[in-house]
Image: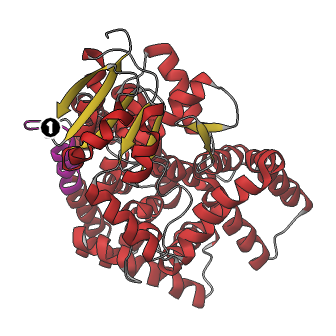
Amino acid sequence: MSKLNKYLPVFKKYLPLFFFILIIGGLWIRSITLSSVPFFEWDESIYAQVAREWLRHPGLTLHYNGSLWFEKPPLLFAVIGILFQIFGASEFIARLPSVFAAICCVVLIYQIIGHITKNTFAQIAGMLLFASTPFFIDRASIVNVDIFLTLGWLLYVCDGTFASKFIGTIVGVWTKSFLGLFPLCADIALSIYYHSVTQKKIREWVVIALVSLAWHIIMLAQYTDQFISSHIKDHLISRVTTPIELHFGGKFFYIEKLWENYPLLLAVAAIGVLLWIFMHIKRYDTKNADVLFLLPLAYFVLLTVGKSKLSWYIMPALPFISIWIIFALQHISRRFVQNLCYVGLILWSGSMVAQQTYGFTITNPRVPQQVSLARCQQYMPPFTRVAYLVSPTQRKDAQVIEAAQVAIASSFIYGSAPSFVFYIDKPVTFFYKPVEFLNHVHEYDAFAMHIDDTTLLGEGAQKAFTPHMEVITECERGDWILYSRDTVAK
């Protein structure tokens, strides 16, 4: 027994390192496995293209497909753009910042729980609970801004210093816009509640707010109406007031998503929240934990009120749910039973992490048709601009979105094929009306269409497609065909 007591401190010292290596190694292996997978449609492809265009036009103003783009602040795109410049543009390189941010989140959760419990097993259990969720694994493996918002929130609450609050708010706001201000707002609210507002705090809040909102201020001054319409109206207000682009869901959409994955753990987290409320009623000192409850609960209220529902919006709240679970278990009176619960959680969540990372495989990976179509250009005469007729099915979807009045200005700039834009790396004009496509296709030296639309290539349309009698080269990939004019051959 004396030997066991001798080596127990050493075991507890290196045990966290083992699980850190488990998570880091797993995320690295998953990223390498995904490196052969093209960018997923929508966010990944859009963000990768914005990063590429930032590299061509560095600065605070972002572009997509040659046009101004105000959906998100520039921090992540600048980082990816710089990495593209150093290592070349690839899926693996673009996804690396997300891996790094995810690892930082895990470290910060370990640190935060350490401040609360002073228990190594609790710290390991908390970080593994977070790291084992499918939401975390997904966001840690692809290009996205949600993992950086999560990092910003955790930085703000990790140690209470001005430096961490300052950096955390900048990371959050400069990647996910105004949502990055949530911890600052919670901090201000709690300071008012506890009558602890000081001149020093006010100065710090003002500095944090001004620096973090610098991009918004500059864009507002430079582009006024365009910025207000796109960033503030379409991508802030409309997402709260309208189910944008048919992203419907009930009031308890996010609770249901969590319940589907971890019903027992969600119940324990709810007990943690009830305990916190009870301690407030009994006037126990909860100052150190208040922001860890108020911040995610306020966010849950926003998600519940908001009309647009997307499952990954829950991401910033996940680390706090893990902390709530540890908070609940911390109040088990018998230390042995408490540690037994922690060990059980470590073994279970650790196996989940290993299964989703080390055990992650891609069987018969299939390259999306739009990506294959874009890659066709290497077999065709060179071209500079592309006209793209959106497929009949997607045109019908667009009509439904318009009829339901849930469209925003950017709803149709991606043509349901942002991966095509990235991989073809040429300016692409998307057409949703065949008549407009036929009227303007002669202005382009390449054009793409779905095979269901090839009836447009009738006798009457031939002059529009070949006004100067150039030879038309075509490449078919799945249901799509890419045509290029050979202006040299006659």
Pinpoint residue 40: horizontal percent, then vertical percent. 31, 43
Give the magenta part as a residue range.
347-364
- Please name whichever residue, 261 or 364, is drawn nearer the observer in this view of the structure: 364
The amino acid at mark 1 is: Arg
Answer above or below: position of 246 versus 322.
Answer: below
Measuring 80% from the left and 57% from the top, which residue is drawn there? 205
Measuring 46% from the left and 55% from the top, which residue is drawn there? 412
Answer above or below: position of 295 versus 27.
Answer: below
Quadrant that contains the C terminus:
top left
Pinpoint residue 441: horizontal percent, then vertical percent. 42, 37
- Place residue 342 in its image quadrant: bottom left
- Please name whichever residue, 54 or 470, is drawn nearer the observer in this view of the structure: 470
Measuring 71% from the left and 53% from the top, which residue is drawn there? 227
Measuring 46% from the left and 79% from the top, which residue is drawn there? 273
Which SS class for mark 1? loop
Left/right of residue 347 with respect to residue 231 in the rendered view: left
- Place residue 364 in its image quadrant: top left
